[in-house]
Image: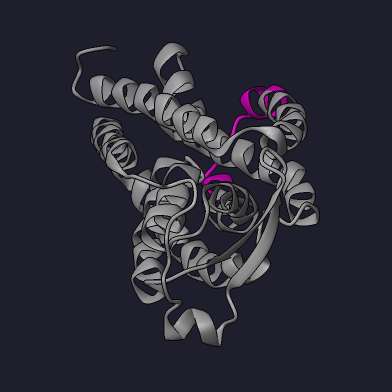
Amino acid sequence: MLFVPIIGGFFPFHIDFVRGAGLLVALSGALAAGPGLLKKGMADLRLALPVALIASACAIVGAMLGLALPAKVVNTALGATILGIVAIMFMAKKSEYPEVKQADALSTALRINGIYHEVSTGHEVNWKIHRTPQGLATFILIGVMAGMFGLGAGWANVPVLNLMMGAPLKVSVATSKFLLSITDTSAAWIYVNNGAVLPMMVVPSIIGIMMGSIVGVKILAKTKPAAVRYIVIVMLLFAGLRALLKGLGIWN
């Protein structure tokens, strides 16, 4: 979520090339971190697969739409969207362990629930989700935005899984990371097919992101959920402001 606004803002590359690289960077990081998150029980396969089917199909549409729109329009929409997500996450309460009194019928039918070990407290966390139909419908929009902005959608996956559907924050973060390995593949091919991928940008970026993701999996397991929340908020705030100001022509 930081790659596209930072590289697009401080390096002389067209936004189409930056978005193409951003998708491949997010994809490589997801492939590096996904197996570890599944093994630790934080990423949940039953939660990820229905969402991935919807988001990956819509990401293809978003990628084609993003390549057709002017760069300023894309940057402005990107910044406004991320800042809106920041506001929602900042005002939300009890997002580390949301209270879900009863699972809805769809999540019960799909058996979307689980238990994971919270290393920072030493407790076993039982979780379930609700508002599953609304969440899946929201991922239609998220998939379109992921392909259009080239961000991999982790910035939107986490709030929807956590705040709307009620999954614990760590489960939301870990499942979102795994989701990227499916969603980003669909959108990335559109950029590759249109020649919007430069190896000189992608290769060094992927090496750094994959190394960071391997370390990040170990840190996530031991970090307190509240700290994860604040880190996400700060990173999203910086990225959103940068993209918005560039799109409006204030900070070029």
Q: Does the magenta run of residues contain 197?
A: yes
The correct choice, above or below, for 125 with respect to 106 in the image is above
* 187 relative to 71 in the view: left or right: right
| Horizontal and vertical percent position of residue 119 | 72, 42
Q: Does the magenta run of residues contain 195?
A: yes
* 130 relative to 71 in the view: left or right: right
| Horizontal and vertical percent position of residue 218 | 76, 34
Task: Look at the image and tell me whether residue 191 can be seen.
Answer: yes
Q: Residue at x 52, y 48 (%)?
A: 169
| Horizontal and vertical percent position of residue 226 | 50, 34
Depth order, front residue of 24/234 = 234
The correct choice, above or below, for 3 with respect to 104 in the image is above
| Residues rendered magenta in the picture | 191-204
Q: Residue at x 37, y 50 (%)?
A: 145
Q: Residue at x 44, y 55 (%)?
A: 98
Depth order, front residue of 244/199 = 244
* 190 relative to 62 in the view: left or right: right
